[in-house]
């Protein structure tokens, strides 16, 4: 379906076709950008810029390759631009303003506020691969390509992030299990 839509857009652009593409990807893009930037307002800006770049570069997209990794690469790059441009401040607690939209996804961060809050506490190096892997269900190879890293580096970052999240979950559950 996406392949046919992209092919039609490349042959003859129309607002209606681009709107279909937008509707297919906007919700997930907003959730991803919110999880990466930590702000729904920032996410909206990032997603807008992402779709502008998709529009400008759609003619250069190679139809022989899957569209999702290409799209997510642009989204990731826009999130990075935003994070570099603005001093990143990790929220200490999740408010209604920064919560993820209540849409079902591969991993429902919004239904697990504690997990989302802990993911937000991770540094960018570990948080972004977690978001890409579990919110967008991307393969480690796609994440590595997107982030211009070795696949083993991505696997290592995912392992360390999961380990840290597990530590924080155990601390939350028991507090005094390890002498704290």
Image: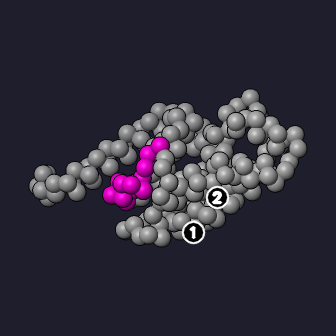
How many other residues sit within 10 Å of disc 2, few (<14), some (14-19) or many (≥20)?
many
Could you say where residue 2 lies in the image, as x and y percent from the top left? 70, 38
Where is 86 relative to 58, above or below? below
Please, which colouring scheme is shown? one colour
Where is 63 relative to 15, above or below? above
Look at the image and say whether residue 109 sits in the magenta stretch.
yes
Say which quadrant the C terminus sits in: bottom left
Please name whichever residue, 65 or 149, is drawn nearer the observer in this view of the structure: 65
**Marking on residue 70:** none
Where is 94 relative to 171, above or below? below
Look at the image and say whether residue 111 sits in the magenta stretch.
yes
C-beta proximity under 8 Å, tags 2 and 1: no
Q: Is residue 167 left or right of residue 131?
A: left
Q: Which residues are magenta?
A: 106-118
Could you say where residue 54 lies in the image, as x and y percent from the top left? 74, 50
Please name whichever residue, 13 or 54, is drawn nearer the observer in this view of the structure: 13
Q: Which secondary structure class fits the magenta region best?
A: helix
Element marked by disc 2: helix
In the rendered image, which residue does mark 1 sit on? 41
In the rendered image, which residue does mark 2 sit on? 47
Q: CA distance from mark 2 to mark 1?
A: 10 Å
Q: Residue at x 51, y 66 (%)?
A: 39
Say which quadrant the N terminus sits in: top right
Q: Residue at x 39, y 55 (%)?
A: 111
State whether residue 95 appears in this view: yes
Could you say where residue 121 lies in the image, as x and y percent from the top left? 38, 59
Query: Which of marks 1 and 2 precedes in the sequence?
Result: 1
């Amino acid at each position: 379906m996406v392949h046919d839509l992209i092919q039609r857009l490349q042959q003859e652009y129309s607002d209606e076709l681009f709107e279909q593409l937008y509707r297919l990807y906007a919700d997930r893009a907003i959730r991803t950008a919110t999880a990466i930037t930590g702000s729904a307002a920032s996410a909206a800006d990032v997603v807008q810029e992402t779709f502008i770049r998709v529009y400008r570069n759609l003619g250069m997209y190679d139809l022989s390759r899957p569209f999702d990794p290409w799209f997510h690469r642009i989204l990731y790059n826009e999130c990075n631009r935003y994070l570099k441009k603005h001093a990143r401040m990790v929220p200490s607690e999740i408010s209604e303003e920064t919560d993820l939209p209540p849409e079902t996804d591969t991993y429902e961060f919004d239904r697990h506020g504690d997990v989302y809050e802990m993911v937000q506490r991770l540094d960018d190096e570990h948080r972004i691969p977690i978001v890409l892997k579990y919110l967008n269900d991307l393969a480690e190879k796609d994440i590595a390509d997107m982030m211009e890293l070795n696949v083993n580096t991505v696997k290592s970052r995912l392992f360390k992030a999961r380990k840290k999240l597990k530590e924080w979950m155990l601390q939350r559950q028991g507090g005094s299990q390890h002498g704290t």
